[in-house]
């Protein structure tokens, strides 16, 4: 039985879904992060390679695929003609280069890749993956957790009887979607509580807390996911199908950052990516999909002409180009993907 909050969220999504299935001018931006078979995926960030291949083959046949900048240009020109569909990826995972790009090349589909430049070359960059790999995949964890936070505060949590997880619990954890389903037990509740504590920290402080969490867990699982290294990013960006976009240097929450910190994060990331790839950057994606009151202005001042959010929806003519909605694909059934695209781009 879903909580009232989840119920309302599902209702809202249902209404938003229905509005997708009608031809309208403009376009649609598909949101991906990773193309990989993963054991757990609470934020629905991964799509299996074979599914991505099928999706891109279908999109290529529609003949309207473009980058986010291409779609923004189309909207700026009044969006006459067939709606465009843009593919976008956030964060800069290595599998974008190793797995997604060969598939995009096979089908001739361009895509926009939003890269958080401080993660490039750092194997331990994506702390959110570490959290769920420990809490949702490790069969045996200590019962009690106590962490020292940089503020001096102690964070405590208890896994109780879920410290030792049997097959049934591990399966429930691995198939849990944190943004659609309420936390069902202590492992899931602890993951959400830690996420809230870690998200606002500065990267160095967060790294220390994640190291302590690693030690606590005794986890020896090798990182299955890492960002690209500088040479890999440089080679990746050479593909004619790849548009590189900004995503802040340290993946910060722009809705909470002070104005000067936000401006520096946006500009440093842009400068790093220009230097690493030689590309002029035109498009930006909001980390965590969150923006503060002056974020759009800062993005514009940094020279970006479009910005994407995680807000669910289609891009219509007249949409603010600095606040474009996207549709997260995750493990969307292929039939639903097909229906959504076909209704958006009538033959
Ligand atoms: Zn991101």
Image: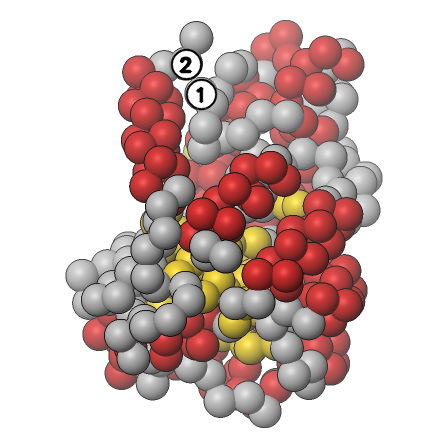
Q: Image point 58% across, 22% down: which residue?
A: 187
The residue carrying pointer 1 sits among few (fewer than 14), some (14 to 19) or many (20 or more) residues within 10 Å by Cα, namely some
Which residue, given by chain and number where applicable, does mark 2 sit on? 2
Which residue, given by chain and number where applicable, does mark 1 sit on? 182
Q: Image point 73% across, 82% down: which residue?
A: 235
Rendered view: 117 above or below 290: below
The answer to the question of whether label 2 and label 1 lie on touching residues, with beta carbons closer than 8 A, is yes
From the viewer's side, name the closer residue of 120 and 237. Answer: 237
Rendered view: 126 above or below 234: above
The residue carrying pointer 2 sits among few (fewer than 14), some (14 to 19) or many (20 or more) residues within 10 Å by Cα, namely few
Report, in whole angstroms, how far the alpha carbon at label 2 lies from the one at label 1: 7 Å
From the viewer's side, name the closer residue of 123 and 283. Answer: 283
- 4 horizontally vs 284: left or right: left
Q: Image point 50% across, 64% down: which residue?
A: 86
- Asked if residue 14 can be seen in this view, the reply is yes
- Asked if residue 268 can be seen in this view, the reply is no
- Residue 316 screen position, x and y as percent: 29, 60
């Amino acid at each position: 039985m879903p909580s009232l909050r989840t119920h309302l969220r599902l209702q809202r999504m249902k209404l938003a879904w229905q509005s997708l299935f009608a031809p309208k001018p403009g376009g649609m931006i598909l949101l991906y992060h990773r193309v990989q078979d993963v054991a757990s995926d609470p934020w629905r960030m991964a799509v299996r390679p074979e599914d991505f291949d099928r999706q891109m083959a279908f999109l290529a046949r529609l003949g309207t695929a473009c980058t986010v900048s291409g779609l923004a240009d189309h909207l700026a020109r009044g969006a006459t003609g067939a709606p465009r569909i843009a593919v976008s990826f956030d964060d800069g995972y290595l599998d974008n280069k190793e797995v997604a790009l060969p598939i995009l090349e096979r089908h001739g589909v361009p895509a926009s890749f939003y890269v958080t430049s401080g993660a490039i070359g750092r194997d331990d960059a994506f702390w959110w993956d570490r959290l769920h790999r420990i809490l949702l995949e490790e069969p045996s964890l200590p019962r009690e957790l106590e962490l020292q936070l940089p503020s001096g505060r102690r964070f405590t949590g208890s896994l109780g009887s879920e410290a030792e997880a049997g097959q049934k619990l591990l399966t429930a954890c691995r198939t849990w979607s944190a943004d659609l389903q309420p936390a069902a037990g202590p492992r899931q509740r602890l993951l959400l509580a830690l996420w809230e504590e870690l998200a606002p920290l500065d990267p160095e402080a967060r790294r220390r807390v994640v190291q302590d969490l690693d030690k606590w867990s005794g986890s020896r699982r090798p990182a299955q996911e890492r960002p690209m290294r500088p040479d890999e990013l440089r080679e990746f960006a050479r593909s004619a199908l790849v548009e590189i976009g900004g995503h802040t240097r340290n993946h910060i929450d722009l809705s909470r950052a002070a104005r000067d910190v936000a401006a520096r994060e946006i500009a440093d990331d842009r400068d790093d990516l220009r230097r690493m790839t030689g590309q002029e950057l035109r498009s930006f994606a909001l980390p965590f999909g969150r923006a503060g009151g002056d974020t759009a202005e800062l993005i514009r001042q940094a020279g970006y002409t479009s910005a994407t959010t995680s807000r669910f929806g289609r891009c219509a003519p007249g949409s603010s180009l600095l606040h474009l909605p996207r549709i997260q694909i995750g493990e969307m059934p292929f039939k639903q993907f097909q229906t959504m695209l076909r209704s958006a781009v009538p033959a």
